[in-house]
Image (cartoon, rainbow, N blue to C red):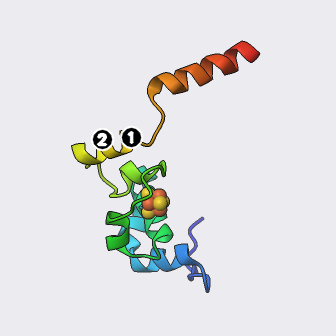
């Protein structure tokens, strides 16, 4: 099942990243590592720039809190995020609404 003849597809950013970060890509593809997958997705989003991922300001992005590929989520970033996303109660009310409509 292995694809020993694999070559990066011309113009494919994600394949470029596979070639540039083979360790991370291998973890993603063969160890099913979610953190490596998120890290690669963020790198693809930022044209391969680690610095741009680190400095990403798209706080509302669902991947933002995981963009470093590890569990590091400093308190100040946690606070910043909590200011722009709905509260748990808001989600609960939406879920209640959805359940009542059924
Ligand atoms: S967290 Fe930032 S870098 Fe990662 S996918 Fe979202 S917008 Fe892109």
Q: Most extreme residue toward the front, as rendered?
A: 83
- Residue at 37%, 44% (x, y): give it: 81
Seen from the viewer's position, the closer of residues 54 and 7 is 54
Q: In which quadrant will I find the C terminus? A: top right
69, above or below 81, in the image: below
Q: Is residue 80 above or below residue 97?
A: below
Q: Is 86 or 72 nearer to us in this picture? A: 86
Of residues 1 and 6, the one drawn nearer to the viewer in this rendering: 6
Number of marks in picture: 2
User: Are there few (<14), some (14-19), or many (20+) residues within 10 Å of tag 1?
Assistant: few
Measured from the top left, where is residue 65 in percent x and y?
A: 37, 49
Residue 60 placed where, x, y %? 47, 49
Q: Residue furthest top?
A: 100
**Residue identifier under label 1:** 83
SS assignment at label 2: helix
Does residue 45 appear in this view?
Answer: yes
Decide: is 19 above or below 76. below
Residue at 45% over, 26% down: 88
The answer to the question of whether label 1 and label 2 lie on touching residues, with beta carbons closer than 8 A, is yes
Considering only vertical position in the picture, is 43 above or below 33?
Answer: below
Circle 2 residue:
79
Q: Quadrant of the N terminus?
A: bottom right
């Amino acid at each position: 099942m292995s694809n020993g003849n694999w070559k990066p597809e011309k113009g494919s950013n994600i394949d470029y990243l596979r070639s540039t970060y083979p360790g991370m890509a291998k973890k993603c593809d063969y160890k099913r590592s979610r953190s490596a997958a998120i890290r690669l997705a963020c790198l693809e989003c930022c044209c391969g720039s680690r610095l741009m991922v680190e400095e990403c300001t798209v706080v509302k992005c669902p991947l933002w809190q995981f963009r470093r590929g590890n569990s590091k989520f400093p308190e100040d970033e946690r606070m910043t995020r909590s200011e722009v996303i709905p509260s748990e109660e808001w989600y609960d009310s939406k879920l209640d609404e959805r359940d009542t409509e059924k």
